[in-house]
Structure formats: C-alpha cells, structure tokens
Amino acid sequence: MEAIKRLGHEIELQCESHGAPIKITACEVVNDGERFIFTGIPKRGTQIDKIFKRAEDINVYLQLALFQPFFDDKILKFVISTQSAGDYNFFNILKSPEFQNNRMNVCIPLGRDMRRNVKCFDYASPSSPHTLIGSGSGGGKSELTRCAITGLIYKYSVCRLNLVIIDTGGNSLDVFHASKHLSHPIAKDIKTTIYLLRKIVVEMERRIALPRQELKNEPVLALFWDEFNTTIKKADNKEDRMALKNLIEDILRRSRKTKIHCCLISSECKNDGIGISKSSLTSRIGLRTSDRYESRAVIECSGCELLPGKGAMLFKSSDQLTPLYVQGSRIFDPDIERIIAHRNYENQDTGKKFIIDEFGSSVPSGSPSSNELTSPTDEKTIISGNQKELADIILWVLQFNTISASRIKEKFRLGNRVDEIMDNLFEMKIISEKFANQPRKILIKTIEDIHESVMEMLSVNGYTEDDVATAIAGRKDQ
Ligand SMILES: Nc1ncnc2c1ncn2[C@@H]1O[C@H](COP(=O)(O)OP(=O)(O)O)[C@@H](O)[C@H]1O
Ligand SMILES: [Mg+2]
C-alpha cells in the first residue's frame, strides 16, 4: 500500500516538473499487481497534452517497465508496471477466449486494452459494416492490417470467409499471396483494382437479389485496401480516378446486407482530396496521427495525436462510443506463412468460395470452356526440356479435373524442375494459370482442345489419339 502511494506521489512530482500538475486520486490493482492503473485529475490550467508528450521522459526517470497515460472514458489515467511492458504476443491473442469464443459475426483481434484484456471487434456487425484505419505514415496501420487478416485466416474457413486484398503502395501484405482465402491474387496496380471492384459490385448485386436463406450460405467477402486514397490519387487519368471513387462508394453504400465488408486503410484522412463519404465506415481505428485535425478525420475526435505510436490505437464504433485505448500486436512473415500453410493444408470445403477470374488471364480460371481453348491461337506453343517426360506427364494429368504441382512433383520425382514443367503445361493451355497455391484446373475437356503442336509432340513420343481420348474419358478428381 505504501509503495503504491509512493508511486502515485512520484507521478504527481514528475508531471509537475514537466509543467503539467495533476492529483492522483485512485489506484486500481490489475492482475494481482502485475500492473496498476492510477487516476489523475489535472489541476486548473494543466495542459494534458504535455503529459502525453513527456511520457517517455517520465518513464526514463521512473525506470518502469511500463508507463503510459491514456484516457479511459474521458478520464485521465496512467498504467504502470514494474514487471513487464505487456504481453502482446499475437499467438496468445489468437488463442484467447475473447477471440475464440464470442458471438461476433466476424471477429477481428485488435490487441490488448490497458487492463490486459484482449480486445476484438465485429468486422461484420449490422451496425458497423465497414472499417476505416487511419494514421500518419509509420503509425502501424499495415502491421494492424496484417494481424487482422491473419486473425481472419486463423479463425474462419474458406467456406465462411474470402478475402480480396488491394495493396498498390507497399509490400507488407504480399505475404498473404498463398492463402486459399483469397478470391483473386493481391491487386498491385490500378487496373486490377478497378477490375476487382467491378467484380465485387457484380457480386454485391447478385447477393442483393438472393433470398435471405440463400445469402446465409454465402461466405463473407472481406475487402482490405491498404493506402486506398493514395491509390486513387495515384491514378494517372481522371477516368480511372472517378471509376475507383464511384465503385468503392457504391460498395460502401449498398453492401450492408450482402455479407461484403470493407476495411479502408488510409494515411491521409484529412483533406485527402478525394471526398469519399465516410458515413458507412462506422468502425474507426486511429493510430498515431500528426495532429488533432487528422485524428478528427479518422475517429471524429482528438486523441490520436497523443498516442505513442508503435501500434497504440484508439478504437471507436457504434458499440464503442468513447475511444478505447488498445495496444496492437505484431506478427512476422514466417509466422503468417506457417498459419497460411497450416490452413491451406486442411481439407477445406471450397465449394461456395467466391472466385474472381484472374485479371488479364487469357484463360479465365472460372470458365475453362472459353473459346480460346476450342480454337487455339496460332501463337507458337513453347515446348522445352525432356519431351518424353513431358509427354508422360501430359498423358497422366489428362485423367484429372485438377492437379497440383506437388502431386506431379511426387509422381515424376521432379524436384525443383516442377515449376518449369507447370509453366510448360500452362503455356500449352493444358492447365489453368497459377493462383495462390491452389490446384490448377485441367483445361482440356475433349481431344479437340489439344493444340496441334502438342498432339504432334505426344505422337512423336509414342502416344496415339486413342491414348489421349482414353485418358480424358477416365477423368477423376486428383
Ligand atoms: N504493434 C506494434 N508494436 C511495435 N511496433 C510496431 C507495431 N506496429 C507498428 N510498429 C512499428 O511501426 C513501424 C511502421 O508500421 P507500419 O504498419 O508499416 O505503419 P504504416 O502502415 O502506418 O505506415 C513498423 O515497422 C514497426 O517498427
Ligand atoms: Mg503501411
């Protein structure tokens, strides 16, 4: 008790020495004394900003593991620990009951509040259908987005949730490229972004027309768009800029009841020059902003300008009206890769998955019966490497509807050469284009689909048309 009093007094002295006198009035003991939360009442005329700005200096003086002022329901508090700076290990958050067992539609883990409780929010709540994450550059938006997406992949199967990721500025989301949850490879340029948004609008309209019972069975479609306003501003012609703006506005406005939810991530919310209405972005997460005006643009009140950075955030939504202070976690690429590999390995039902044909692919993966297949173009088909081996592989894969690289590799003991063989098979229009690490579709449905030059190569290597027809006739799943 004496020690707590002394600590409270030390805080008062420190704040006073930095020109911001306060009175400590209460102390809450959290987690058997692992941390303490002091309540402070500012004395008349105290500029509270000063306390936040000097928090690091005060901590250096007090030599605590953790010292952080924050607002708890608008009341100034100080969280203090002599033992640890906190457990922000993301795996512990993923395993926590708060994340695992709750009644949210789609649960996203944010981090821990100052009492060390895990805080999540409902990304698909009927009252908060879309989310805005904003801060100055380096505030921790991409890091938070990585944790959010990893949480979704970890918790939801492909039949319950699919992802569309747009990241035209950086590469911090590239690590998700192999996830089976992706409806389309990550968009890295403006044309692909426009294409994806158009596809989402089409899907939204299809879902609007669905009876409620059928909509229930559709997976949630989660769109994450990092640096969305920079992407729009970067578009080098007015048509593209208008297309991007109109499409995303349309989605934000009409997708509320279609299980399509957006998370827009932006580093210039204030005066962004785009003027997208933010009214349906009802969940707001502000990390450290450059000033209070930027904070208002993100969370509709000041406070983010006082955050210490490094993943500290204020969260607001229609269920959380006063900003909640949360410390976010970090997750590193190898850990994300492990979670993705683990999820991909599971035999997930992908029947209802929302798949968008790959942008720019001449052979859309969703429509293998496209004209291009039945009337191959004259472009030179590239056949390289060991032709007998390639012919054997072709005859073998023709028996399947889909085939994965690892299966071919195992069967023909190809080692690293499998990538080259897969490229050959794709160039010959035998298998569909690579998309994440998903099995490729066999595009040959009848013997007529096989390009002349490929048939010639097969016959040079001892296979007749009858052999090919028999292989196709015996079709089975991989
Ligand atoms: N939760 C966190 N804990 C510790 N450091 C963090 C956290 N989040 C972000 N950072 C630090 O901030 C840096 C910038 O984060 P980043 O997510 O790239 O910011 P932004 O996308 O807002 O520009 C990271 O490289 C990391 O050093
Ligand atoms: Mg970023």
Image (cartoon, rainbow, N blue to C red):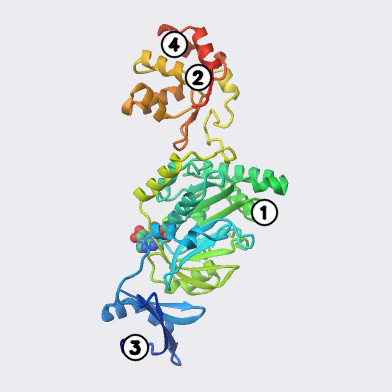
Give ligand 2's quarter of the image.
bottom left
Q: Quadrant of residue 419?
A: top left
CB of mark 4 near ligand 2 (< 8 Å)? no
Amino acid type of disc 4? Answer: Leu
* In front: label 2 or label 1: 2
Circle 3 sits on which residue?
1
Q: Position of residue 420 (x, y in %)?
A: 37, 26
Amino acid type of disc 3? Answer: Met
Q: For the point 40% across and 51% down, which residue is it?
A: 172
How many numbered marks, from 0 up?
4
Q: Categorize mark 3 by other alpha carbons within 10 Å: few (<14), some (14-19), many (20+).
A: few
Q: Earlier in the sequence, mark 3 or mark 2?
A: 3
Q: Position of residue 402 (x, y in %)?
A: 50, 27
Q: Secondary structure at mark 4?
A: helix
- Mark identifier at residue 399: 2
Q: Secondary structure at mark 1?
A: loop
- Mark identifier at residue 257: 1
Q: Position of residue 88 (x, y in %)?
A: 37, 64
- Whether residue 306 sits left or right of residue 4 in the image: it is right
Q: Position of residue 222 (x, y in %)?
A: 55, 50
Amino acid type of disc 1? Answer: Lys
